[in-house]
Amino acid sequence: MGVFGKEYTTQSDERLMELVVRGDERAFGAVYDRYHGRLLNYFHRMLWHDRERSKDMLQDLFTKLAQRPTSYDPSRPFQTWIFSVANNMCKNAYRHEVVVRAAAVEMRAGPDRVEATNGIGVDHELFRDRLQEELEKLDPDHKATFVMRHHEDMAIKEIALAFGCSEGTVKSRLFYTLKKLAERMKEFNPNAVYHGKA
Amino acid sequence: MERREHYDPEDIENLLQERSYDELLEEERAYVLRHISGRAEYEAMRQLLGQVREDDRRREPITVEPEIRDTIMAAFRANQRPQWRIWLNSIGGLLWPKELSAMWNENRLLRPALAFASLALLIVAGVWMIQSATNNKESAQVAELKKEEPAKLKVAEPSVPATENQSVFEPAPPPTQQPAGSRKDVGITTGATRSFNEVEMDAAPVSGNAQPLEVAADESVAEKKDGNLDERREGERAPITTDAVTRQSAAGATQSATHVVTEEELTVNTSLANATGKVTKAVLKEKAERSAGISTTLGANPELLALIGAGW
């Protein structure tokens, strides 16, 4: 295991997937070990910070990969491919629960929260919750683009490949998402003048 | 000539990350102001971007239970099993889906109900074909049996009076007056004998015993089957028939004022046949067998047995 295990850890994603397609169990384990954390956090951010649901989605994703490893397109980088699959799963989840979640967000949002954060110091927990609320109000593609870029540190090119769009589209999405969030969350900006609007 | 922009609108992110509004060059600031209202918005975006990065660094990563990994690896191992098992599973799942609504899938090629109906149709068709084949065999056997009945009727009826006329009601003709060829009418029906027998039957119908009828019929059938049997062999049947009748009369069961064929007459007939020098051992053997058959038949006749019982 030692020599082969070392080889597995140094292999590229695409090479590992070749081995997985041939039925190499340890290669599949290496792929899981390499990506399960990032994907779980991605699901967690995309799916309303629901841990259990995120774990279920992660398990579903890798179970599908285990059952059909040939569904991977070798011409694409594995990272962009696996994130595009994860993003599609999140979209399906949104279709089922976006209405319910939107209603829940409306109930949770309140003016007292704005007052509490209207100061120089920034409560990170509050900022996190508020950012999550605002992200969930966005279009799923814009939200996913933002999460991939600023939480998963994916390159613009990788995000473009994951979405199957141009890099310019990704940059544009990022710019307007950031602009919109800054406008909606300006109470967290200590330099901004607060006018009492959320 | 207008100077071409070095930045696209979406590239502001790099500027936001690297420089504050005051640090922007004139060229960069002009570009930013085309897409952003002013300093405040630029600084708000920059602040938010920094907070997002900072928040992401502070966030504790979520961990996964090792059971999930085991489950996924087990799924991978299960997928590596021989393909025929999966194929059988898919067939089983197709033919018997968990939900009944899936029995009639939108995909026409994957309709278990259609598959079941086709299977049932094949089974019904197969059973019907097997049954029809069996019936045909039985019908053929019945047809073969029925084929013999008309022969029995056509041949036996005229032959019986002939036998009785000659053997029972009339004395045996002398050998010189009745050559072997003329005895053909005893066992085998020809056109001439037929007319003769019909006349005889109208005048004196056969009374009672039907046993000679069966005997004659059997022999007639035998004669029909063996088309190569020559007339001499046919001539030899007269004594057989009369022999049977003699035995019947000897049992004390039949007609009272009839001529009884004696052993001497039989001897004469046999000697006549032998005199022709054409009776072979095989014919004699066959005659003996037929006599045995006749005896068996007579013994099995319930009417005869009833008569015997009355005699007792």
Image (cartoon, rainbow, N blue to C red):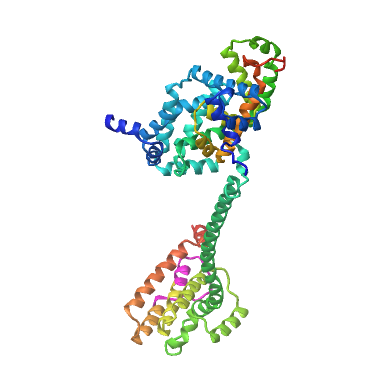
Relative vertical location of residue A7 with respect to residue B235 in this rendering, above or below: above
Q: Residue furthest left?
A: A3
Choose top left, top right, bottom left or bottom right for residue A75: top left
Out of A44 and B17, give the one closest to the viewer: B17
Relative vertical location of residue A18 with respect to residue B301 in this rendering, above or below: above
Q: Main secondary structure of the magenta part?
A: loop
Out of B184 and B247, give the one closest to the viewer: B184
Q: Residue furthest front?
A: B1
Q: Is residue A47 in view?
A: yes
Quadrant holding the N terminus of chain B: top right
Q: Is residue B36 magenta?
A: no
Choose top left, top right, bottom left or bottom right for residue A29: top left
Relative vertical location of residue A157 with respect to residue B48 in this rendering, above or below: below
Relative vertical location of residue A1 with respect to residue B194 in this rendering, above or below: above
Q: At which x and y percent is residue B14?
A: 54, 29
Q: Is residue A90 in view?
A: no
Which stretch appears magenta? Answer: B244-263
Q: Is residue B248 magenta?
A: yes
Q: Residue at x 53, y 79 (%)?
A: B162
